[in-house]
Image (cartoon, helix red, strand yellow):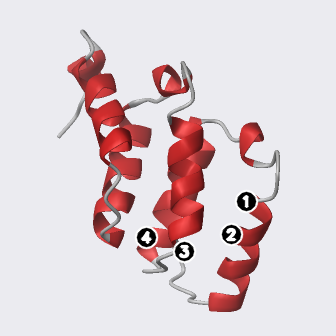
């Protein structure tokens, strides 16, 4: 995505592979954020993939592992693609508002 190479077939293949049973369970917060960011950066709107990323993110206790950059990148990606997921945004907001979380924020 950083190179700006927009290959729909490649990204569709990556999304399909990511959504195969059990694959997302191996993703850590950085993997979620980077995947969402890459698709948003390229403007590729894959509703199923983003729903899968949101579902993984909302699994119990998973959000507690997100750092500031991962929260910001994930929220940005969903907003950029115009994908409304109220539960995800509420979870990201809750994570952000936890005491001390924003102390590492550098605007």
For the C terminus, give its image quadrant: top left
Residue wearing tag 1: 19
Residue located 28% across and 61% down the image = 79
For the N terminus, give its image quadrant: bottom right
Residue located 72% across and 46% down the image = 24
Give residue 66's position: percent from left, percent from top.
Answer: 47, 29
Reply above or below: 40 against 7: above
Q: Earlier in the sequence, mark 3 or mark 1?
A: 3
Give residue 18's position: percent from left, percent from top.
Answer: 74, 59
Secondary structure under the numbered disc 1 in the rendered image: loop
Q: Earlier in the sequence, mark 3 or mark 4?
A: 3
Say whether residue 105 is left or right of residue 4.
Answer: left
For the residues labelled 1 and 2, say whether their Cβ atoms are less than 8 Å apart.
Answer: yes
Q: Toward the viewer: 75 or 16?
A: 16
The answer for how far apart the CA atoms under marks 3 and 2 are is 14 Å
Other residues around mark 4 within 10 Å, as few (<14) / some (14–19) / many (≥20): many
For the residues labelled 3 and 1, say whether their Cβ atoms are less than 8 Å apart.
Answer: no
The answer for how far apart the CA atoms under marks 1 and 4 are is 17 Å
Residue wearing tag 2: 15
The answer for how far apart the CA atoms under marks 3 and 1 are is 19 Å
Q: Earlier in the sequence, mark 1 or mark 4?
A: 1
Secondary structure under the numbered disc 4 in the rendered image: helix
Q: Earlier in the sequence, mark 4 or mark 2?
A: 2
Mark sitting on residue 1: 3
Mark sitting on residue 40: 4
Secondary structure under the numbered disc 2 in the rendered image: helix
Say whether residue 98 is left or right of residue 1.
Answer: left
Mark in front: 3 vs 2: 2
């Amino acid at each position: 995505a950083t190179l700006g190479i927009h290959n729909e077939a490649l990204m569709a293949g990556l999304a399909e592979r990511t959504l195969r049973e059990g694959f997302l369970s191996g993703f850590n917060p950085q993997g979620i954020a980077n995947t969402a960011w890459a698709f948003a950066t390229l403007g590729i709107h894959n509703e199923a993939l983003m729903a899968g990323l949101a579902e993984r993110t909302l699994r119990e206790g998973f959000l507690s592992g997100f750092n500031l950059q991962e929260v910001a990148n994930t929220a940005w990606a969903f907003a950029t693609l115009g994908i409304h997921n109220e539960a995800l945004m509420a979870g990201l907001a809750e994570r952000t508002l936890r005491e001390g979380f924003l102390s590492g924020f550098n605007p």
